[in-house]
Image (spheres, rainbow, N blue to C red):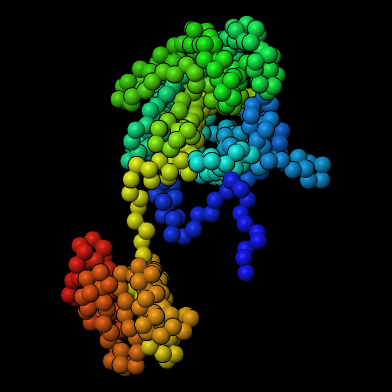
Amino acid sequence: MALTIKRPNGTEDVIPKNIYKWHTVERAAREAASGYGFREIRIPTFENTELFQRSVGETTDVVQKEMYSVIAKETKFTLRPEGTAGTIRALMQNGLLNEAMPQKVFYILSCFRHERPQAGRLREFHQFGVEMAGSSLPSADADIISLASDIINTLGIKNTELKINSIGCPKCRAEYHKALKKYFEDKKDKLCETCQSRLEKNPMRILDCKSPVCSEIAKDAPLILDYLCDECAEHFEKLKFYLDNLDIKYTVDPKIVRGLDYYTKTVFEFVTTDIGAQGTICGGGRYDGLIEQLGGQKTPALGFAMGLERLIITMENQGISFDSDMGCNLYIAPMDDNAVPHAMKLAKSLRDEGFWVEYDVVGRGLKSQMKYSDKLGATFTMVLGDNEITSKKARLKNMKSGEEIEIALDSSFVQNFSNIAVGEMFNGVLEDI
């Protein structure tokens, strides 16, 4: 019978044989973030819609076209399209911004946007992200860029480019908006309908439009770097100095504005050419006005997010190895029903010590059990029948080398197996015990 209900378009299943790739990326990100003093936070999958309207911006594609929202008993909720707004809301609501600064958190979560699915762009996607609240200094910007760079380098990803820009503060952006409006005014009729409305509300959004026509019109638009106030210009120069000090190579790209309204001053992206058009694997920057915008005290903040799917695709395309998918440590093959309770107890004793141990639970014959152990990638197998139970001795077979060794089925079993398994793991050979 054919399956009639399939997963929604733009979503993916991560099946057990592929999960080790995700574990590789998540482990590298967690460990790097911990080294920089970031602690994990977990937030709801959905928030009140107003949170994203106020933070992300009503003129953005995310809010206008891509959010998944539902009205439940007159309350409008939205599946999170990104991680920053909900995380900042959590920091505020739980009083973390009243504690010692800076507050530094990281998250691994799924996000939802209604986009046209393609390689590296899904409707449900996953992000690793960090948020830091309480520092206005450019050294903080350099620190989180350094963290992102460390994660990428730890994963072995090559052919990436760090692009940085400053989009200024509300003061200097006001002058920049005037220049953009003047530039686009006589080209207004050629802009897409969305950008025509943006021209009055937030002309910088036009620079981020995906329309080829709008992109072509915008290519000669004034540059924000020419309109920075003294404070923003100094902040950007110090950031570049710190990145140079850390030997982190970068390119200044005045076209980067990021797609969300809450950004101020520093914005940056790590991009690669190895995953096609969706080349941004990390994006972030500073958003000093967001906390105040959401009703809190004026508090500077910054962060970044990495797309996990894009990191994995990049690693696959570059032929980078992932952490090994550890197979079963031991498969115990009971010869008959009488041997099953003995296999069960031996398995439990090793499982209690952290080993992956399997035994037959579907009534296979011995030959079929050996085939199944191969599919599990079992490092060792052990047949258990009346002779083994009576003598309290069995033959432990290394499935890679074919070598067999006798092992006692008594109180020393767990320790003896541990010695053999560790020897195989670290030395690649069986040691006589």
x 38%, y 38%: residue: 151
x 34%, y 86%: residue: 384
Residue sitting farthest toward the left: 432
Q: Nearer the viewer, residue 126 or 229?
A: 126
Q: Nearer the viewer, residue 228 or 70?
A: 70
Q: Tell me if I can see residue 346 in this picture.
A: no
Residue 401 % position (x, y): 22, 71
Corner quadrant of residue 281:
top left
Q: Would residue 335 be found to the left or right of residue 393 on screen?
A: right
Corner quadrant of residue 394:
bottom left
Q: Quadrant of the C terminus?
A: bottom left
x 43%, y 86%: residue: 341
How many numbered marks appear? 0
Compared to 16, does 149 lie above or below?
above
Compared to 303, does 114 lie above or below?
below
x 33%, y 24%: residue: 249
Compared to 269, does 185 lie above or below?
above
Residue sitting farthest toward the right: 74
Q: Tell me if I can see residue 267 in this picture.
A: yes
Residue 42 % position (x, y): 56, 45
Residue 346 % position (x, y): 38, 80
